[in-house]
Image (cartoon, coloured by chain):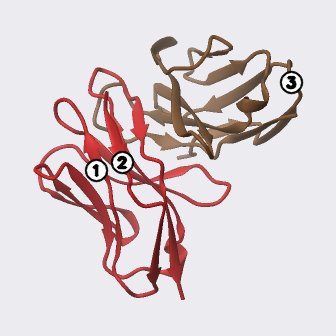
Chain colours: A brown, B red
C-alpha cells in the first residue's frame, strides 16, 4: 500500500501571499490530520477531518483553514502568510476517528516564508 | 488537557549499549500513548503504542516501551542501540474525546556513538 503523500515537498513564498498544501491519505483511511512542526514550538495540531467534516481544530488563527474531499484527500490553506508560518507541515492519516489505530505520517511540506 | 513531557533534549549512547528515552504523561482518563521517530527531512514513523493490556509493549526495529501507571511514564527502550537509531524521537498522547488529535512532547535527539 502506498503511504501518505504530500505535495509539494518544498515551497517558498513571500509574506502576504497564500498557499495551499495537499495530502493524499493511505487508501481506505478516512481521517486526516494536519500538524505544524517548528524548532521553537515543536509539533502542534492544526485540525482533523473525517468524512469531509472538520472534527477538531487546534489553536491557530483563522488564516489557517482546511478541507477534505469525498475521496478523503485533504488540503490546507494558509492566507496572508507571515514569517512565523515557516515550518514543516505534516499530514497524517488513520483508518477511522476515535479508534485505537495509529496515525501514519507523510513526508511533509517544507514551507519557507520570505 | 492531555500532555507529555520528554525531560531530556539529547540522549547519547554508545553503539551496543541499552537505549532509554524518557516520557511522562498527564491525561484525564485512560492514556493512549505512542512513540514516533523522525529521521532528517522525513515525516514521523510509528514505532509502537499503548492502548490497554500488557505494560510492556513491543514495536518496530527492536524497540519496546514500558507503561507505568503509578509513575505516569512510558519510556522507550532498546536493548542494544545501533548507529542507525540516531534520530529524533517523539512521545505522544491521543486526545480521548472522540478524535485523533495527538499532543506531542518536544522530542529527544538520540545520538548513537560508534
Residue B47, horizontal then vertical, whole percent: 39, 57
Q: CA distance from mark 2 to mark 1?
A: 5 Å
Residue A53, horizontal then vertical, whole percent: 48, 10
Q: Is residue A21 left or right of residue A99?
A: right
Residue for badge 3: A15
Q: Is residue A45 left or right of residue B68?
A: right
Q: Nearer the viewer, residue A101 or A18?
A: A18
Quadrant placement of the C terminus of chain A: top right
Residue at x 79%, y 16% (from the top left corner): A80
Residue for badge 1: B24
- Residue A52 appears in the figure: yes
Residue for badge 2: B5
Above or below: residue B2 compared with residue A54: below
- Dots 3 and 2 on the same chain: no
Q: CA distance from mark 3 to mark 1?
A: 39 Å
Above or below: residue A96 compared with residue B73: above
| Dot 2 or dot 1, earlier in sequence | 2
Residue B76, horizontal then vertical, whole percent: 32, 63
The image quarter containing residue A25 is top right
Amino acid at each position: 500500500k502506498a503511504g501518505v503523500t504530500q505535495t509539494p515537498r518544498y515551497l517558498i513564498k513571500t509574506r502576504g501571499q497564500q498557499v495551499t498544501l495537499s495530502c493524499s491519505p493511505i487508501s481506505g483511511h478516512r481521517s486526516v490530520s494536519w500538524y505544524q512542526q517548528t524548532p521553537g514550538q515543536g509539533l502542534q495540531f492544526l485540525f482533523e477531518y473525517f468524512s469531509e467534516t472538520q472534527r477538531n481544530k487546534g489553536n491557530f488563527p483563522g488564516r489557517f483553514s482546511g478541507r477534505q474531499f469525498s475521496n478523503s484527500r485533504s488540503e490546507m490553506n494558509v492566507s496572508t502568510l507571515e514569517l512565523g508560518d515557516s515550518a514543516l507541515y505534516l499530514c497524517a492519516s488513520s483508518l477511522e476517528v476515535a479508534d485505537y489505530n495509529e496515525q501514519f505520517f507523510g513526508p511533509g511540506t517544507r514551507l519557507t516564508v520570505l | 488537557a492531555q500532555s507529555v513531557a520528554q525531560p531530556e533534549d539529547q540522549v547519547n549512547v554508545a553503539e551496543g549499549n541499552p537505549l532509554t528515552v524518557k516520557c511522562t504523561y498527564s491525561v484525564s482518563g485512560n492514556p493512549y500513548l505512542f512513540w514516533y521517530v523522525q529521521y532528517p527531512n522525513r515525516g514521523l514513523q510509528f514505532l509502537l503504542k499503548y492502548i490497554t493490556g500488557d505494560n510492556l509493549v513491543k514495536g518496530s526495529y527492536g524497540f519496546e516501551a514500558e507503561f507505568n501507571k503509578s509513575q505516569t511514564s512510558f519510556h522507550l527502550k532498546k536493548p542494544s542501540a545501533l548507529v542507525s537509531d540516531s534520530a529524533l524521537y517523539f512521545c505522544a498522547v491521543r486526545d480521548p474525546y472522540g478524535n485523533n488529535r495527538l499532543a506531542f512532547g518536544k522530542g529527544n535527539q538520540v545520538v548513537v556513538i560508534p
